[in-house]
Image: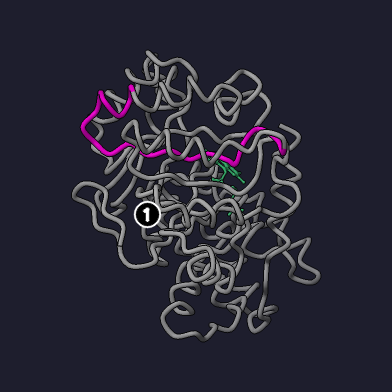
Amino acid sequence: MIALNRIQLPDKPLFLAPMEDVTDLTFRYMCKHFGADVMYTEFVSSEAIIRESEKTLRKTRIFDYERPVAIQIFGNNLHTMVEAAKIVETFEPDFIDLNFGCPVKKIATKGAGAGMLQNPELLVAISEAVAKNVSLPVTVKTRLGWDDSSIIIHDLALRLQDVGISMLTVHGRTRSQFYRGVANWEPIGALKANPKITIPIVGNGDIKTPHDAARAFDHYRVDGVMIGRATIGKPWIFKEIRHFLNTGTLFPPLTVTERVEIARMHLNKSIEFKGEKYGILEMRQHFGNYFKGLPNFKETRLKLVTTLSVEEIEEIFQTIQKNWGNIPLDNDHLIDNHCQKLERL
Ligand SMILES: Cc1cc2nc3c(=O)[nH]c(=O)nc-3n(C[C@H](O)[C@H](O)[C@H](O)COP(=O)(O)O)c2cc1C
């Protein structure tokens, strides 16, 4: 069982991966509702925290019902990272996570995110300095290495453990892989098999089904499983996985009627957090995800993602239920769509 200071996590904990522009307060509410055990804010820039950027500070907002919840920061300057960590500590997350895994060009090529994997000395120094300067547990999320010729995770994990990092999440890809190919879980399993590693290891990458999660726990023996893209358009995946881990049986895919109910709940929360106009605007990407794959849906979809009226959205929901209600819908295809979009950034 994972314990981070005072935080005790349940057996086989399921983590919602931090995802910029996805895992905001509303999306986290949905995932918590469906059983996510641990959550993170979207990553926030350490420099922007220090500048007191309003937009960035808004992203660090957390609520008690989300606990345990972490604020994730990124950057490549030791002093800035320490100062930002001290600031976010006052917002009282349960722990602070350091992002050394973001592959996006504008971040990694400037030496932050996964760019830090090219400078492990600094990565470890920042981790040590942050861990020493805050009293909350400090954790790290990273990748296997920069590219295939520099898989440094084994040495790095030991060094991070030595300097006071409390938990390590590893995405089984290199930075060069971006989101391509398949995640390589062998190095993650090898980390867990190393008796010198005593901190919890959370495995991440391509968990799309309850079977994937069960394999991560049973075969690779990780302490926690983190799920990212498979939650998009499917926040109930946590419930499906937990059910499978507990019983060995699968839920049938949700019908479109059930999806409508979830989309309605999501919309109501979005409006509660952001007000009617922004709440609806924010939902447009999610509506697309909840109903993607429905046959002959183009016209209805267009209406759904252009109206700014809650009443009209409710009418469209009713139409969807009437016309498509009993269709079971799977949405694995969403994962590929997201990768293509990210690589262009
Ligand atoms: C849209 C998107 C945004 C992301 N933003 C972050 C982020 O802010 N911080 C982070 O550590 N990882 C971020 N990631 C990476 C995910 O946390 C996760 O490591 C990655 O998607 C692999 O897990 P998956 O195969 O379950 O999606 C992002 C991924 C996606 C798809």
Q: Who is closer to the viewer here, 160 or 298?
A: 160
Q: Who is closer to the viewer here, 60 or 242?
A: 242
Instruction: Give the quarter of the image for residue 131.
Output: top left
Residue at mark 1: 38
Residue 235 among magenta residues: no
The residue positioned 52% from the left and 25% from the top of the image is 120
Q: Is residue 145 left or right of residue 67?
A: right
Colouring chosen for the image of the structure: one colour
Taking the view exactly as shown, the residue that stands out farthest to the left is 6
The residue positioned 62% from the left and 66% from the top of the image is 316
Q: Who is closer to the viewer here, 266 or 213?
A: 213
> Which residues fall within the magenta stretch?
129-148
Residue 147 among magenta residues: yes
Instruction: Give the quarter of the image for residue 59.
Output: top left
Image coords of residue 19 (percent x, y): 53, 44
Q: Is residue 242 left or right of residue 215?
A: left
Quadrant for the N terminus in the image: bottom left
Image coords of residue 198 (percent x, y): 35, 49
Q: Is residue 165 above or below residue 85?
A: below
